[in-house]
Image (cartoon, helix red, strand yellow):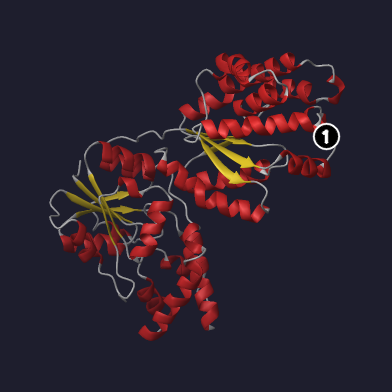
């Protein structure tokens, strides 16, 4: 095992193609320059932009500098987040760090951009240093970047997806791994110059670790009063978790598996208006027990990010608060069914019950639960607020009264940071 591992960023740790290619295209269109064919355009991912503009678009250095400026005009506010950690990278870095390796990044991106990406996507905590050019530098020599973070390259390997990474490693006196899952266009002759080659992240893990480490599962629940927007934002939560490198599973409560879906039909049917609060609470707990057993626990063991539209907090709020059964009573009903499988993060979309009722009644005909009176929803709102106040380490509170676009922006900004802060990614 190598003691020092230097990673390239774009095309090696993250699949940054979406944002980079869209921003390069934006810059070229602003300049009135032709946009290269897709196979050429993808070569912009990884190497320094100035050189790529000059090489692939036949620009002068001054024109390339203007291209970089226009690229950043789009990339800085938007493009940097159009990115995705390669699945398997996070557990690889975590295990290398646990075994005492020193991890670095050497990238041709500006230092500001590199740090923003690494921090947002939760990779910075694994690193001992980051080497990147100053924004005023027109060119970045990768070998110098490697040596700036790792002056003694004995027992060092550079991992990257372009021939420039392999050549830089050789110049710096380090070994190299050529990764083929990124954006580099390799010839067989170029691959022969690398110490190793890795077609996949799993193959890279075998080279660096001798095994493929498992990902840790993450459980997220989405909560709030009806009409808060949680179901609308569910797909965005899924996208965020996939961008962080996770395989995801979407589910819901009541429901999520065949038995639980049948219980859902009983619970929500307007034909069962005589159902007692205790029966209702116990049916929710029974549905949850089967859901945890059949779906949630196996997915977490497999290292997935489970995203569930409602979980036990809804029972505590709606039956414990709204139906006045009491928080402790409902918690006890659910203890056996949950079996210790509680969310790592609960994203709570906060709205008041008056706004909830207006939104819900304007959307569709109410189900049995939604036919309760305003006092029921006021008690439910208070119970949710109490849960959020008592569990600040688990609850991420967002303002559900805002527009869909505003809530999405707040979610994008806060969820990755919350996961990183809590040590969950």
Q: Is residue 179 above or below residue 223?
A: below
Q: Quadrant of residue 291?
A: top right
Q: How many marks?
A: 1
Identified at 72% across, 14% down, the residue is 278
Report x, y in % for residue 240: 53, 47
Residue 58 seen in this snapshot: no
Q: Quadrant of residue 379?
A: top right
The quarter of the rendered structure image containing the N terminus is: top left
Q: Nearer the viewer, residue 376 or 255?
A: 376
Residue 74 seen in this snapshot: yes
Report x, y in % for residue 241: 51, 44
Find numbered disc 1 in the image and state the secondary structure of the residue it sits on: loop
Report x, y in % for residue 420: 41, 43
Q: Is residue 303 above or below residue 61?
A: above
Identified at 67% across, 42% down, the residue is 351
Report x, y in % for residue 269: 82, 25
The quarter of the rendered structure image containing the C terminus is: top left
* Image side of residue 28 versus residue 142, left or right: right
Q: Residues within 10 Å of mark 1 (few under 14, many from 20)?
A: some
Identified at 47% across, 66% down, the residue is 76
Q: Which residue is mark 1?
A: 366
Q: Nearer the viewer, residue 52 or 137?
A: 137
Q: Quadrant of residue 363?
A: top right
Q: Is residue 418 above or below residue 220?
A: below
């Amino acid at each position: 095992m190598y003691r020092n591992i230097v990673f390239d960023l774009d095309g090696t740790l993250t699949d940054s193609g979406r944002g980079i290619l869209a921003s390069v295209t934006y810059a070229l269109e602003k300049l009135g320059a032709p946009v290269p064919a897709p196979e050429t355009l993808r070569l912009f991912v990884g190497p320094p932009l100035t050189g790529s503009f000059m090489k692939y678009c036949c620009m002068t250095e001054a024109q390339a500098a203007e291209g970089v400026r226009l690229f950043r005009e789009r990339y800085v506010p938007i493009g940097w987040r159009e990115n995705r950690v390669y699945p398997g990278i996070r557990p690889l870095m975590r295990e290398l760090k646990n075994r005492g390796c020193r991890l670095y990044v050497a990238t041709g991106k500006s230092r500001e951009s590199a740090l923003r990406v690494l921090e947002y996507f939760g990779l910075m905590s694994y690193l001992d240093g980051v080497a990147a050019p100053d924004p005023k530098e027109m060119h970045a020599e990768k070998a110098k970047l490697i040596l700036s973070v790792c002056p003694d390259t004995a027992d060092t390997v550079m991992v990257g997806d372009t021939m420039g990474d392999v050549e830089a490693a050789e110049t710096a006196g380090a070994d190299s791994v050529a990764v083929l899952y990124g954006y580099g266009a390799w010839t067989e002759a170029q691959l022969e110059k690398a110490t190793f080659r890795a077609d996949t992240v799993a193959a890279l893990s075998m080279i660096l670790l001798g095994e493929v480490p498992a990902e840790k599962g993450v459980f997220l629940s989405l909560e709030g009063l009806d009409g808060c927007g949680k179901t609308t934002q569910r797909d965005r939560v899924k996208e965020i978790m996939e961008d962080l490198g996770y395989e995801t599973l979407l589910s819901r409560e009541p429901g999520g598996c065949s038995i639980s879906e049948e219980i859902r039909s009983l619970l929500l049917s307007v034909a069962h208006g005589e159902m007692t609060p205790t029966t209702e609470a116990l049916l929710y707990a029974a549905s949850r027990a089967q859901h945890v057993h059949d779906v949630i626990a196996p997915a977490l063991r497999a290292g997935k990010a489970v995203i569930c539209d409602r979980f036990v907090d809804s029972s505590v709020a709606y039956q414990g608060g709204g139906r006045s059964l009491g928080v402790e009573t409902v918690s006890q009903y659910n203890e056996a069914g949950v079996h210790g499988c509680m969310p790592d993060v609960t994203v709570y979309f906060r709205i008041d019950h008056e706004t909830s009722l207006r939104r819900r009644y304007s959307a569709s005909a109410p189900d049995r639960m939604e036919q309760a009176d305003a006092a029921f929803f006021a008690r439910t709102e208070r119970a949710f607020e109490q849960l959020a106040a008592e569990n600040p380490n688990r609850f991420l509170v967002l303002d559900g009264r805002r527009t869909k676009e505003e809530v999405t922006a707040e979610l994008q900004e806060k969820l990755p940071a919350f996961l990183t802060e809590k040590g969950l990614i």
